[in-house]
Image (spheres, helix red, strand yellow):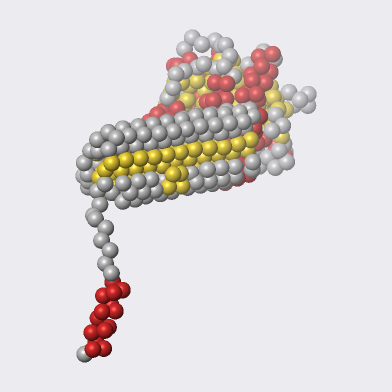
Amino acid sequence: MDRLVTIILAAGKGTRMKSDLVKVLHPIAGLAMLAYPIRAAQQIGCRRIIVVTGHQRAHVEAACSQEGIMFACQEEQLGSGHAVAVTQDLMEGFEGDVLILCGDVPLITAETLNRFVQSHREARAAVSVLSVSLDDPFGYGRIVRDASGNVTAIVEQRDATNSQQKIREINTGLYCCSASFLYKALSQVGTDNDQGEYYLPDIVKIGVGEGQKVQAIETDDFEEVRGINDRRGLAEAEKVMRRRILDSHMSNGVTIIDPDSTYIDAAVHIKHDTVIYPNTLIRGGSTIGSGCIIDINCSITNAVIGNNVHIKPSCVIDACSLEDNAAVGPMAHLRQQTVIAGGAIIGNFVEVKNSTVGKDSKACHLSYLGDATIGAEANIGAGTITCNYDGKKKHPTVIEDNVFVGSNTALVAPVTIAQGAVVGAGSTITENVPENSLAVARSKQVAYDTVSKKESEADEQKDG
């Protein structure tokens, strides 16, 4: 949106959260609370955003540093009016409109903001405030109107008269202002109030006094504009946001069997015709292709999953890549920096860490593959482990194309099993295995006739 700057107020600590972490960085569906008003502003085309920081300034700036975002620091928290005023140097020469949002109002949508800004511009207003009417408005600033319905002031709860406290229309804390009016009005805001702070809502009364166009634009959705102040509010916002996320995926062609037991973070991307079964958690920046099946009880974090991948029940997948037509599980654990190539199968109770499993290879049962590079069409038998750690360092194992590793085998790294080799079941391999050879490393089997021995001893005792 041209000639629009967004200011997001994020300087407060949020004491009611009872946390060492500043309020606006508490996560909702995998993203910091503050990320959502930033996203909404970006979605309406605002390319210049100023975040006002204060408590844990460095952490807040690190969490939302990206192109088009600037920061202004409110060293002392002297009220919302003071918070906006500290942005003035960054606004030098700007003559458009200023959208003011709160960092602790994460559920605001781009659709609502777009209507708000357009209404402000159509009215040629100096200041517009977004309002909502509540059955119980206690604690909120009231929108005061005259007999003709014109806005005359915003009065905070603690400063309101008895008659003003009966007003149901409240201030959401979201504003759109002409920049030229805003900073001029802020210079006139005083501290004659119960808290002795510079109140941003006072610009409404100043605008009215100057004969400027002032309006309150009412929304009927309190959920969108509700501020998060404590852990209960955080949980409620999480629930709303997650349902929005699920609805978006279902609208885009993803089947979610039971939305009430499915949790998908905000940054996750899923393509059409993928089916997600209950009790599944998909987190971080995971991407999932089309035609996949994500079975019950799976946890997927920061994974890249191709098309037509089947993740069977109760798998844990963390920071891995699964290419087209791969299959994993049930009850498999894929750890960071693992790549499962197309058509490969990782079966039940198999753990893979920092390894590449080649195209159409299989490790179907009860194995551990760590720091390994496995070629195409290899078969890893049940109970195979790569012994990659010597107590001080990790070492690599290389298993080349078309290798067959028998069951219950230990591969002591560093070691290479060359192309086409076969490793006999029960072997402990400590040396490289040449191409197309058979490697067997186990003690010779010996059978003792223990029954005959016991019978002989019994006969001797009888004779004695």
> x, y (%) of residue 162?
70, 41
* Residue 28 in sight from this viewpoint: no
Give the total number of marks visible in the rendering: 0
Left or right of 51 in this view: 160: right
> x, y (%) of residue 406?
35, 46
> x, y (%) of residue 340?
42, 34
Left or right of 324 in this view: 261: right
Q: Quadrant of residue 37?
A: top right
* Residue 307 in sight from this viewpoint: yes
Seen in the picture, residue 138 relative to 304 is either above or below; the reply is below
Farthest residue in the bottom direction? 464
Residue drawn at x 25%, y 45% as measured from the top left: 429
Residue drawn at x 64%, y 32% as measured from the top left: 250
Seen in the picture, residue 431 relative to 455 is either above or below; the reply is above
User: The C terminus lies in which quarter of the figure?
Assistant: bottom left
> x, y (%) of residue 96?
56, 12
Foreground: 19 or 345?
345
Left or right of 174 in this view: 433: left
Residue drawn at x 31%, y 32% as measured from the top left: 419
Q: Quadrant of residue 115?
A: top right
